[in-house]
Amino acid sequence: MSSEQFMNEAVSPWLKEDGPDSDIIMSSRIRLARNFEQSPFPLFAEEAILDSILYFMEKEYNHQSFLHYKELEFVRMSELKPMEKQVLVEKHLISPHLADKSNKGAALISKNEQVSIMVNEEDHIRTQLYFPGFQLDKALEEAFLLDDWLEEKIDYAFDETRGYLTSCPTNVGTGLRASVMMHLPALVITRKMNRMIPAINQLGLVVRGIYGEGSEALGNIFQISNQITLGRSEPDIIEDLKGVVEKLIEHERHARNLLMEQSGIELEDRVFRSYGLLKYSRIVESKETAKCLSDVRLGIDLGFIKDISKSILNELVVLTQPAFLQQYAKKMLTPNERDVFRASLIRERFTLEQREEF
Amino acid sequence: MECQECHKNHAIVHFAQVINGDKTEIHVCQQCAKEKGYVSPDEDAYSLHHLLSGLFNPNSEAMQKLTEQEKEQQEIQCDKCGMTYQEFASIGKFGCASCYQTFSEHLNPLFRKVHSGNTIHEGKVPKRVGSDISQRKKVRELKVKLQQAIADEAFEDAAKIRDQIKGLEKNLNQHGGEGEV
Ligand SMILES: [Zn+2]
Ligand SMILES: [Zn+2]
């Protein structure tokens, strides 16, 4: 397989699309946790019960299509190699828990990789939908349709008072976790993000740096999600989240304008140094990659860099994760080797960009 | 922002906890978040472990201090999956749907902590079992309205509301719905 083909297939198709406010919002996600009424939750169920759930889900939903989610493919964790599972984790199609802990786990993944229904994770069913950009309403609407479609054949564990019953008390009620992934470089550069986080928390939302192997929010990418699932309706939960996200977008745009006015040349310098580093380095570690990708993406949004597609940040943060690099290299890599392959993959991705122009 | 546990790394997991009505901010690094049980490594939010350890401490010293009533509470056991309240409190996960019924009367304080004071579901109802549920909810709402109308001496309104309630209840009984509201 050529590296071009590899990269094309590695990136989920929806990730390359543009969505509303995609200069700041990378993706929107809705997750609904559901359980079968009659079976103990997966962490405490006997293997035979989990097997029967797998059997049922495969029989009823494998190769089915719903809305524009074509050809759901039923993938059993027990049939995947560790590296294949890791790739699904890095694409956020399955959770680390499903990959590592549940050998009776499976996922139904739509062809466009926008929908992934995890089976026998902590809950029997966890439906996830991804949309590019800021599209929480749309995502919720389709998640509800998908949920109704599943419910035609499944008796959900539901209680009139407590709502949808889940393994963990943090999910009970709506079973909803709504989140957006935001790129907030200007708020980080101007040191405003740290001050805003406590205020966001006070509103019942969780802020989380992601893609950090260690201790930092790599690439200035933050995930904002709801904490409360009980006592508020799904549309209300989404409205609260949207309200905060809209404020953050406003602040980020304002901070970008301010940076341009007050230190335009320094910013331009920063952007092009990072661009050069990604384009020419031979060894690059993940932390530096994330920082530079964030700078380059900011440079594209601010108009400094014109010949590169916007989705490069979204694509490369996924492509430069350890399991992807090993797939690309077709072998296990030591951390040092990884840094070499990472640099080479990034260079090739940039070369691809330039070819597309002609 | 510095991690409040190790004071070394940058905090990247941020949320607020409500304990006895007071909001406490939590800012921890990824590592501490996992080690101290603030988040389960997979979940996008945070786990309960930390909250529950405050709610019930399973070590034996603490056990001796428990009152008879508290001891009884620890021993409640789910018929369906066999989980005891004590196990639930130390693991932080329910064993099955029936656990919710079994531990029902002890869950409100926990849910209030986790869900900002809320204990009752608002929101989506499954379609098939749900039509009765939403009708019963409607009946409850109408009954409140009826009381209000009577208190306001708006007897014409009250009569209309009473008819609506009767209609809905008849429907529910025909479905074999429990009709208890
Ligand atoms: Zn720490
Ligand atoms: Zn149980």
Image (spheres, grey):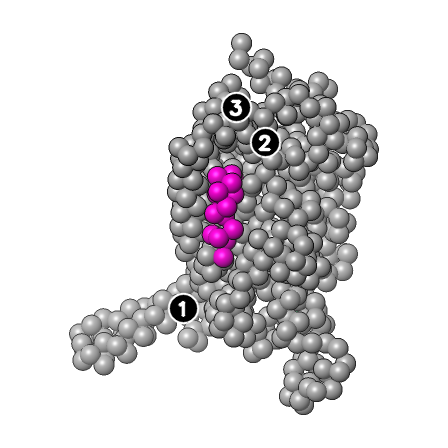
Q: Measured from the top left, where is residue A135 in percent x and y?
A: 45, 41
Residue nearest the viewer, comparing A353 with A253: A253
Query: Considering only order in the chain, which callout, 2 or 3, is on the residue closer to the N terminus?
Result: 2
In the rendered image, residue A303, in percent from the top left (x then y), is placed at: 45, 25
Instruction: Tell me if residue A94 comes above or below residue A259 in the rendering.
Output: below
The magenta segment:
A181-198
Q: Are marks 3 and 2 in contact (CB under 8 Å)?
A: no
Gap in Å between the C-alphas at discs 2 and 1? 54 Å
**Which residue is more in the foreground, A193 or B150?**
A193
Bin the neighbour count of mark 2 within 10 Å (Cα to Cα): few under 14, some 14-19, many 20 and up. many
Q: Secondary structure at mark 2?
A: helix
Secondary structure category for the residue under label 3:
loop
Q: Is residue B161 magenta?
A: no
Residue at x 72%, y 82% (from the top left corner): B62
Residue type at tag 3: Ser
Q: Nearer the viewer, mark 3 or mark 2?
A: 2
Mark 2 vs mark 1: tell me if same chain: no
Q: Amino acid at mark 2?
A: Leu
Q: Position of residue B123 (x, y in %)?
A: 44, 59
Residue beneath disc 3:
A309
Q: Amino acid at mark 1?
A: Arg
Q: Please determine whether, in this image, residue A170 is positioned above or below residue B60.
A: above
Residue A56 visible from this viewpoint:
no
Is there CB contact under 8 Å for labels 2 and 1? no
Label 1 neighbourhood size at 10 Å, few (<14), some (14-19), many (20+)? many
Q: Which residue is mark 1?
A: B136
Labels 2, 1: front one:
2
**Residue at horizontal 72%, vertical 62%?**
A44
> Label 1 is found on which chain of the structure?
B
Position in image of residue B28 (x %, y %):
62, 57
The residue at which mark 2 appears reads as A293
